[in-house]
Image: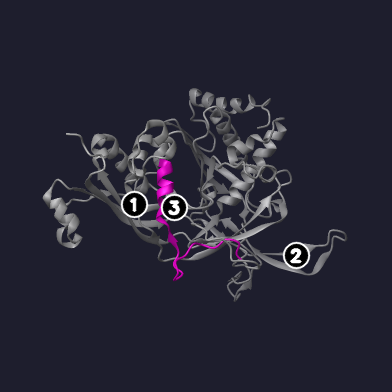
Amino acid sequence: MVMNEESIKGKVVLKGTLVLEAPLLIGAGGGGAGAEIDTEVLKTKTGQPFIPGTSLAGALREFLAAESALGMRLLFGTDAAYERRHKEAWQSSIRMEDVKLNEVEIVVRDGVSLDEITGTAIEHHKFDYEAVGRGAKGEFCAEITLRGVHERHETDAEYAIDLLARKMAAGFSLGAHTAKGFGEVYVKDLTARHYDFEKPDHVRAWLGSEGKYGNLVEPKPYGRQEKIYAKDDCVLEAKFALQGSLLVRDYERAMKVKLAGRADDDGTSVQALMLREGDRWIIPGASIKGALRHRAGEILRKLGMDDALLDRMMGPSLARIKAAPDEKWKSHLLVSEVRLEEGVAPKLQTRVRIDRFTGGKIATGLFTAAPIWQTAEGRDTLSMRLVLHEPKEEERAWQIGLLLLLLKELSTGRLALGGEKSIGRGVLIGRGAVLEYGGEKILWDATPSDLTDDQRQKLQGFVEALLEKREAKTL
């Protein structure tokens, strides 16, 4: 008897609580002419932010496509190109519900486009956008319909479902600005229930109420998993301490917050305040990536290389987008937002603006800033994660080499982060790093004395691969 590949054989239901680990932006467009916000968060008619099921499915489909092409087609269906080539079509078997978010705090971030040569802001390129703040939650539910085709590819289908569930529990990214640390989510307390319709108890459990018949089908739990990266990803994680002060301005809270500088002080208005969300001081991924891109361009130019190579690694520059607006691609470098750990605190600094011509102070030019300083000596204050996501094979080695040079710039204090770098803010001290690539892990402390000769040669080989691109031509 020929198996009907479209006949329904069972169901798999995945349920849990989706949690935001970073701000999330799924935009609904701008607020119209004259609006203060350029991009607003997508909301229901009642004003509740939500994540469309299509956004969830798109992000997970992309991950599965890189890990198991057959598994992706079994769960998400075939596309037109595959169907024309193989004369075979499978419909999508997965349905994801929208996730309505609760415990929501809407945050407003601002950004600016930087000139890659001078590192200064480009006029008329300031923008503001909303995002759902870290910590928001919502009920997650996905349903997979098992058909005859899944029986024919039983092993691959089971592997794909398990891999997808582990990815949900480990975390994935969706929405806008994912290359700058936005959109990191995971599903907490995830369970998978497999209903086999050839078993009467499973049919009763599926048709009946979960409370009455739920114990007939044992759920498979997925606890919090370690991060799952694509097989060709290169992951660099580094730890740093603060050498001095750090200031990434929070324009939204400035002048609204008062800080006490002395025991008898009832509070001073602060014009320059460090960015904070929830219980953590943060360095936005956009600030980190902007600094890395600017310094990477300087490195390439000093080596006599074409800085258009950066477009391959970090996405097209603003100049390239203007020249060829239809020619776009995603950045291969993903930067996570940094949340500073314990051991830092804000301190008030009263400053005065100076007249550049006379050298004297400017009347009414007194202002107060509140950067953060490290309070605990000899400890790590912040961790940074940089991921080269599936770079092209022929460009992978030199891109890792450039990434290592950028890490050296950060670790030695030659590349500062945040604002007011001209007065010494934002300087970091490297406290160690780990590079994971191709199943190998290379770990070193602040002074990489524990590296083996083989590890040193491998790291040096990545840098030498960059030098071999010295004569590379423009894209």
Q: Residue at x 66, y 27 (%)?
A: 472
Q: Which residue is mark 3?
A: 55
Q: Earlier in the sequence, mark 3 or mark 1?
A: 3
Three-letter amino acid code of the residue under disc 3: Ser
Q: Residue at x 57, y 35 (%)?
A: 404
Look at the image and tell me whether residue 34 can be seen: yes
The quadrant in which the C terminus is found is: top right
Which residue reaches farthest right? Answer: 358
Secondary structure, mark 2, is: strand
Instruction: Look at the numbered disc 3 and give the secondary structure of its residue.
Output: helix
Q: Real-space Cα distance between discs 3 and 2?
A: 49 Å
Image: magenta residue range: 37-63
Q: Residues within 10 Å of mark 3 (few under 14, many from 20)?
A: some
Which quadrant would the N terminus be assigned to in this image?
top left
| Farthest residue, direction left | 200
Mark whose residue sits in front, 3 or 1: 1
Q: Nearer the viewer, residue 5 or 327?
A: 5
Residue 259 in view here: no
Q: Inspect the magenta stretch and tell me whether residue 58 lies in it.
A: yes
User: Residue 268 location in percent, x, y?
Assistant: 63, 72
Q: How many marks?
A: 3
Q: Is residue 166 left or right of residue 316?
A: left
Amino acid identity at mark 1:
Arg
Whether residue 182 is situated above or below residue 269 in the rendered picture: above
Identify the mark at residue 71; answer none if there is no mark. Answer: none
Residue 247 place in picture, x, y as percent: 62, 57
Above or below, 423 against 329 in this view is below
Instruction: Of the two numbered discs 3 and 2 on the same chain, state the one appearing first in sequence.
Output: 3
1 or 2: mark nearer the eye: 1
Q: Are marks 3 and 2 in contact (CB under 8 Å)?
A: no
